[in-house]
Amino acid sequence: MAETKGGIVIVGGGQAAASMAAKLRALGYVGALTVIGEEPVPPYQRPPLSKAYLLGHMPVERLTLRADDWWEQNGITLLTGVRIEAIDRVAKRLHSGTEVIAYDQLALCTGATPRRLTAAIGGDLAGVFTVRSLADVDAMSGQFVKGRNLVVIGGGYIGLEAAAVACKLGLNVTLIEAAPRILGRVACAETAAAVRDLHAGHGVTLIEGCGLRRLTGSDWVTGAELADGRLLPADFVIVGIGVTPEGGLAEAAGLETHAGAVAVDAQGRSSDPAIWAAGDCAAFPGPEGRLRLESVGNAIDMGELVAKNMLGAGKSYVPKPWFWSDQFDAKLQIAGLNAGYDRVITRRGEGLSFWYFRGPRLIAVDALNDARAYMVGKRLIEGGSPVTPEQIAETAELKALLK
């Protein structure tokens, strides 16, 4: 690895890093620009990994965010398969083994890593997989054989998406969720019920309110023993119990962190004025304390904003959260943040939509196979338009609320 000559260095090989690098060049930055990724491949899309790619509907070439020659054409040094081990903030140097990389400004876009089961309950057995990287999905893809038994641990979006893919491929799928219901941390009971019905209708066995005691097997996993004593056969297991932000590099360098993430100000700057952060690893100020968003939209928007601020724009980040999840023939589109909601209005239109209110204010919408409801809800939320629960429930044509 050749030593860089300062300029801007971005650590991370995901959506935030790629978006930031592209924006810097688009804004006219002509200095040295280096992107360093730990994975041995160029930056790629992660959402299709648990959907189209796992199903075999999207080749690996289509995952790549930029063509191979784009980096060179834009004068960007792309280093793949490189792990940064330490930041020397005084000398403005990054250390990777025996190599040293200089920077004038540094951006951390290190993302997050999946939580794993402990070895004490069998988490280290072969045949236990997580879904985060291309390598993760490639490692498990050969297990998706019709008629085999899959146990999915965790009823969040990743677990549900993996369960849907496996079921479509003809596997016997059981999903277990220790909490009283699926999607307990991210969606209302009404959305969870609709998703539960979707999976049950396709033959997925959902077990809620019962945790995992241990995985069985001496080498390769053979089963999952539940807290109530039931033993489920398992040819392999997928674990989807959330992620942990990759803030260890920042913490070791003495930067301020928050719940494991890099703490940044409204512009994306860390406690060191020469170091910035964006994407899954960044905790930024919100109306009710620090906030960290795990989404493609946040990675793109925050990455581009930090690029502007590195060049002196001085703009504050105002997120416009949106998310989606594809399961079976259903598309769940989400706009806004539902934290602190106290009322949910259900509408039946093209599909189903669930509208979250905190007091009189609309704060989020979940739209299941209802693109119109999603579009209207997103515009209402982003525009701060006053709308009442009664209007959502009773207005025949949602678009009328935009006038």
Image (cartoon, rainbow, N blue to C red):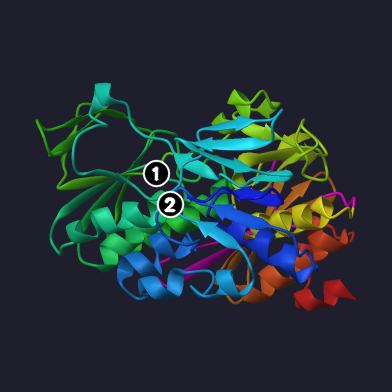
Q: Earlier in the sequence, mark 1 or mark 2?
A: 2
Residue visible at 53% across and 59% down in the picture: 78
- Are discs 1 and 2 less than 8 Å apart at CB? yes
For mark 1, does the 10 Å Cα neighbourhood hold few (<14), some (14 to 19), or many (20 or more) residues?
A: many
User: Mark 1 sits on what residue?
Assistant: 240
Residue visible at 80% across and 68% down in the picture: 28
Residue type highlighted by circle 2: Ile
Residue type highlighted by circle 1: Gly
Task: Read off the magenta span.
Answer: 314-341
Task: Name which quarter of the figure residue 304 lies in.
Answer: bottom right
323 in magenta: yes
State whether residue 136 is above or below residue 368. Answer: above
User: Mark 2 sits on what residue?
Assistant: 158
Q: Can residue 316 be seen in this view?
A: yes
Residue visible at 37% across and 34% down in the picture: 116
Q: Is residue 321 visible?
A: no
